[in-house]
Image (cartoon, grey):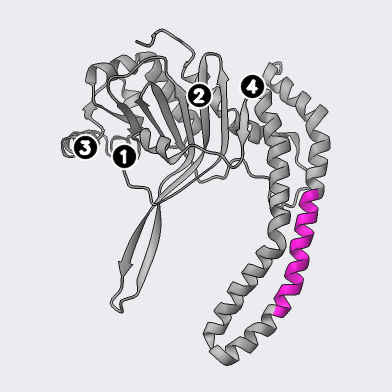
Amino acid sequence: MQPPTNEARDLTGLYTNELQPILGLLEQKRLQTRNRALISLLVLVPVGGFLALLLMSWFGPFGLLITVILGAFAWFWINGSTQQTYRDFFKSEVIVRLARLIDPSMVFQQDGGITIEEFRQSGLYRTDVDRYKAEDYFQGQIGATVFRFSEVHAEYKTTSTDSDGRTSTEWHTIFRGLFFIADFNKHFQGQTFVLPDFAESTFGRIGQQLQEWGSKIDTRQGELVKLEDPAFERLFVVRSTDQVEARYILSTSLMQRLTAFRQQRNAPVAVSFVDSQIFLTISSSKNHFEPPSIWRAQASMLQEDVEHYFQDVRLAEQIVTDLNLNLRIWSKT
């Protein structure tokens, strides 16, 4: 049996010495929030049923819609503050402690996030953003590498009009997941993009040809860069405004590390090297830093639950380590 790592021992110590009493209080808040929600439902359902019958007698089926809207508003008005208190307590007491276990100076702001200007600066997503949300912001330094990351959800909208002249709007996700930025100790003259390669991984050699045709049509992210690492090229397609610099940045070691990181995460990963920084995104539909549902069947959080949150919080450490970002072989000029 392998002995526990320092990281595992530190997390066990944190759980035993600090988190257990806090998780007891968290469980009390969860139960209070759940019970209030249940009581409000017990009151609102019969009242809503009576109101629906009354409004439907006046407005027909439209009365049911009015009742649903009023009921949802009333439920959130009654329960919103307690749910927010439960959420705030979890983030300020649990997530903050997990962050400090990795780096005592790490800053966590639940309402902060990567800005839309930084999102655009990365150059990874070229669709115009119509709605943008970022939350759960982490900032710190691991070794020589200054980093920041947060959850991000960027969307665009489309509007259509049917034959009766009714207009409808649909929202589409550009990116949702974790957005990471770190300094890269070199001034780049060009811009290099490492993007998920859906074409080659799906269509093989035909996909390679599709890449080449596409590169001639869309040059906004530079020209297609062909590299001699089959495992890397099955997962990624590289474009750059400077072919020589792209090969300089994407060393054999870094390509191997990006391949291993992508395989470990088992989710689409995109990377860009712009303005002396590395931008890295991991697509995910999960809301990573939220407390357990108030409806969960299990009572209090166990150490295994805490470990899942810890692995998300230590994303920056993992990227810095796995991609060897602390290896400073370049100097800024």
Left or right of 282, for residue 86: right
Q: Residue at x 59, y 33 (%)?
A: 312
Residue 206 is tagged as 3
Numbered disc total: 4
Give me the residue at 73% from left, 69% from top. 41
Q: If you read the primary sequence from the N terminus, does the residue marked by circle 2 or circle 1 appear first?
A: 1
Q: Which residue is mark 1?
A: 202
Say left or right for 207 vs 108: left
Residue 44: percent from left, percent from top: 72, 73
Q: Which numbered disc, 1 or 4, marks the residue closer to the eye?
A: 4
Q: Secondary structure at mark 2?
A: helix
Q: Which residues are magenta?
A: 29-47
Secondary element type, mark 1: helix
- Residue at image x 63%, y 68%? 73
Distance from disc 4 to disc 3, alpha carbons, whole Å, reads: 46 Å
Dot 4: what SS? loop
Asked if the magenta segment contains residue 81, the reply would be no
Q: Residue at x 68, y 30 (%)?
A: 98
Up-down: is 238 above or below 145?
Answer: below
Does label 4 or label 2 sit earlier along the sequence?
A: 4
Q: Which mark is residue 319?
A: 2
Residue type at tag 4? Asp
Residue 202's quadrant in the figure? top left
Disc 3 + disc 1, Cβ < 8 Å: no
